[in-house]
Image: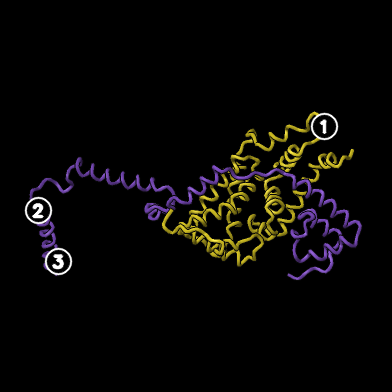
Amino acid sequence: MAANEHIDLDRLSILLDAYGADRTRWPEAERAAAWALIEADDKARALYEDARALDGLLNQASTIEPSPELKAEVLAAASRPRESWIEALWPFGAAWKPASALAAAVLLGIIAGVVLPNPLGSSDEPIESEIGELAMTTVFDIENEQ
Amino acid sequence: MSSHTALLTASDPVHAIVPGMAGSDARAADAELMRRVAAGDAAACRFLVDRELPGIVAFAYRMLASRSDAEDVGQECFLRLWKTAPKWRPDAKVRTWLHRVARNLCIDRIRARKPSDPIDGMELASNGPGPSGMLQQKQVSRVIDTAVAGLPERQRLAVALVHFQEFSNIEAAKIMDVSVEALESLLARGRRALRGALEDLRADLLGEP
């Protein structure tokens, strides 16, 4: 980005309002020009001092350090296996939902097989022969039609 | 931890990662770190926790004004980091990635809060000056915390990222998913609001009437 050679008081005011008085936070392209204006102009200097005072206050905000317990928990989580084979097969969230659905379907199938009557009837004749007869009939019919 | 665990030595490139490292170098170093994390390297995990957890918790605290919420966010960020390690993109920076995740988690928590929910920072600030009329350092900090916590969500986020977390304007804009111009506007409005909110405090500290 090309450096701006000149900036005016309005732009300096916006820069200081946004980034404060720490020059390292100013956009690089405007840094030199902004500082040159502060050194050369009393109004610019006053704006800069005002921003510096606010920075000084904000720097007194409290901060917290992570507790040793949190650090231990985070490190313990790092050593746990990251992806089980279930997650590898089902990477869309909780695996218990599709697993439960599959188990329910299997169970329903078994119950249906045991409880419901045979849909093919109670004939003792082998099913294969019925199918064979049907196939032969169909072939015979087609040949006759020709 | 798996057999991949290895102690990092002083000559290890991981130790060469310092704040201010050029972007591409920092990304390459982070990619190497994340490769080790994915391989179960305990020393790499510890290095990342030491380097990034304090910053993430401090950021979440600035956003949420609650230690317990901030620690929850810090923990969730790292759980997601560990999970992402095998799929880490080499063009990403861990610090930026973590702050993006933390931003989303903080916003979710802020939006889920009811107006009646107590916030640590607010409780602290209600103490006000002591009987002597002089503000003690702790009280000064509390007043400032409350002023920051009182900013609208996006202004608070901008101020937290640039002033407190010391991100560049470009990085902060990326984390917030806004343009640099929009970030600048949010920062300017946020800092002006803070100046107004802290005017009395400033006068008090300077001994002005």
Q: Position of residue A143 (x, y in %)?
A: 12, 68
For the residues bearing labels 3 and 1, Cβ distance under 8 angstroms: no
Which secondary structure lies at badge 1? loop
B83 sits to left or right of A145? right
Distance between the Cα atoms at labels 3 and 1?
110 Å
Q: Dot 3 falls on which chain?
A: A
As shown in the figure, which amino acid type bears the numbered disc 1?
Answer: Gly
Tell which subunit mark 2 falls on: A
Across and down, in percent, residue A46 comes to 88, 54
Position of the N terminus of chain A by quadrant: bottom right
Q: Of helix, strand and loop, which one carries label 2?
A: loop
Which kind of residue does numbered mark 3 sit on?
Answer: Ile
Task: Kindly identify the residue that appears in the image at 79 percent across and 57 percent down.
Answer: A15
Q: Chain letter of disc 1?
A: B
Q: Is residue A70 left or right of residue B167?
A: left
The residue shown at (55%, 50%) is: B77
Q: Colour of chain A?
A: purple
User: Chain B's shade in the image?
Assistant: yellow
Q: Where does the image place residue A33, in percent across and percent down from the top left?
A: 83, 65
Circles 1 and 2 on the same subunit: no
Select label 3 or label 2 by which is in front: 2
Give the label on residue A126, or none: 2
